Image (spheres, rainbow, N blue to C red):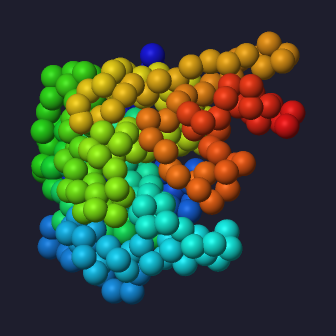
Amino acid sequence: MAVPTLARVAPDVSPFRAAYARLTEVFPSLRVTETTAGEPLPGGAGWVRASTLAAGGEALDSFLAWDEEQILRDYGQPGRPEVIASFGLHRYAWPVCLLVTIPWFLQRRVPRLPVDAVTFQRSLGRLAVRIEEFACLPDDPAATAPGARVVSGEEALRAEVRSAVAAHLAPVLEGFRPRMRRGSRALWGMATDEITEGLWYLGHLLGEEPRAKAEAELLLPGSLKPFAQPAGFRRLTAPDGAALTTRDRASCCLFYTLRPEDTCVTCPRTCDAERIERMTGTR
């Protein structure tokens, strides 16, 4: 499997600038800003720091009010509290996982992102981060950059990806837990899905879907705690014999409570025959 060729990093250039710029290039609705240790993270209207979501309380209530209003507006009915929380958690965790997986996928660099180092403005599709530590491989030109921590090889770097995502999401999941009405395994099932499906989707946008799927399967080859299951890609066969890729989600987004007839194509509730119809446009 081919891996990225790394360009030399100038001392005054962030090791993550190119990866985050490429992310925005193919997915313009998400833009990442980096701040230095001496700069404050953005604040004000619409911005929410991850640490305040982890704390729960009024900050999380305000964050979820957006989802509550959106559900009522778009679907003409109020969402149950756990449905609102599920939507809100997905809309935070999916882009935040990309902060870790995309630099790893493109540059083999893994940032550490404590909850006090990330803030989110979802109405604008903005994330701001402060990266003070990251892991990389021995031959990375950024290995001598401030905050770099060299690991032994690819598997060690994959362990860094899992650890970085888990360290960031663990307190956030705890903040959401009272509103989710789900146990730990179900919450980490959501995290498993956000990692896998975010990397899969961005791999498609980057023109590297086969490699993205292969990398996801190496990253999550089994039920590596705290994550709930493997990436779990599998193939279906279209009527014309073409291979179709799917997977079964480890968690449920609860969208069926709003539109029972319109489940996600990777939802365990969606049978393979329906998946084939939807992916081939025959339905």
Q: Quadrant of the N terminus?
A: top left
- At x 74%, y 31%, the residue is 274
Residue furthest toward the bottom? 45
- At x 57%, y 73%, the residue is 78
Q: Which image quadrant for residue 267?
A: top right
Residue furthest toward the top? 241
Q: Quadrant of the C terminus?
A: top right
Q: Nearer the viewer, residue 86 or 232?
A: 86
Residue 147 point in image, percent of width and height: 13, 49
- At x 37%, y 69%, the residue is 120
Residue 80 point in image, percent of width and height: 49, 66
- At x 21%, y 61%, the residue is 115
Q: Is residue 184 above or below residue 2?
A: below
Q: Nearer the viewer, residue 232 or 108?
A: 232
Q: Would you say 157 lies left or right of 229 here?
A: left
Q: Is residue 225 above or below residue 153?
A: below
The tally of labels here is 0
Q: Would you say 201 lies left or right of 189 here?
A: right
Q: Is residue 42 visible?
A: no
Residue 27 point in image, percent of width and height: 56, 54
Q: Is residue 154 visible?
A: yes
Residue 52 point in image, percent of width and height: 23, 72
Q: Is residue 29 above or below residue 27?
A: below
